[in-house]
Image (cartoon, rainbow, N blue to C red):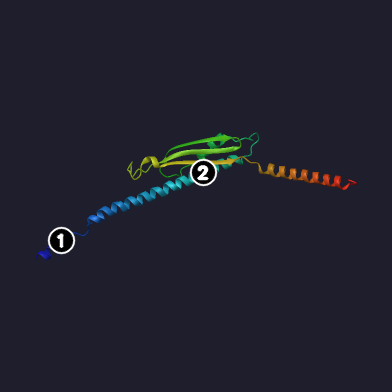
Amino acid sequence: MIKEEIKEQKLRIKGYMTVEAAFVMPMVLCVFVMLIYTSFYLYDRCVFKQDAFILCFRESIRKEEGAPRVDPSYMQQGEARQFENKYFAVNDLETSAKAMGKKAVFQGSARVLPTSFGSYFLMPKSIWRLTFYGSARKTDPPWSIRSYRRKTYVVKKGLKALESIAGSDPE
């Protein structure tokens, strides 16, 4: 009779977790959420780096009349178009564009806010800060090619002149 009551109870209780499962399941869920946030953090970091370099590269190849130098305002104008809405869970975006001689530098920082954990010890807010940096040197490839060709022409002409002088020497 007691065995029948136990069997009847087991049939009524369709789902339950053991004490071990009650500890393991939240831990597994926590690890999965941490992996997801970490992957989004890495994605944001890579895309920020790429966008910073693209802005600098566009400035480095810009050809406008009267713009031989690097112009940081051009990078700031292109920032809104380049950055748009492709970042996940990013807050407090701070950027700056500088010109260092012929080098364009774009750098910034942002904070990825993992809201599901708040400020839990596994995911403190201080470690979720992104910093990115991009730089490119302003170049003029056609000018460089013309300059190189001109220099080689002058050197060849000078060598021919030296050979003709050396060939006409009676010694």
Residue at (26, 56) in percent of width and height: 21
Q: Choose top left, top right, bottom left or bottom right for residue 118.
A: top left
Q: Is residue 157 left or right of residue 8?
A: right
Mark 1, Cα crowd under 10 Å, few <14 / some 14-19 / many 20+, is few
**Is 16 placed above or below 170 here?**
below
Q: Give the SS element for disc 1.
A: helix
**Residue 37, percent across and down?**
39, 47
Q: Amino acid at mark 2?
A: Asp
Please state which of residues 86 and 144 is positioned toward the viewer in this rendering: 144
**Is 151 placed above or below 98 here?**
below
Residue pushed farthest front?
171
The residue under label 1 is: 9
The residue under label 2 is: 51
Please state which of residues 25 and 167 is positioned toward the viewer in this rendering: 167
Q: Amino acid at mark 1?
A: Gln
Residue pushed farthest right?
170
Mark 2, Cα crowd under 10 Å, few <14 / some 14-19 / many 20+, is some
**Residue 157, percent across and down?**
80, 45
Q: Give the SS element for disc 2.
A: helix
Residue at (48, 46) in percent of width and height: 47
* N-term mark: 1 or 2: 1
Q: Is residue 154 left or right of residue 124?
A: right
- Cβ–Cβ under 8 Å for marks 1 and 2: no
**Residue 70, percent across and down?**
60, 36
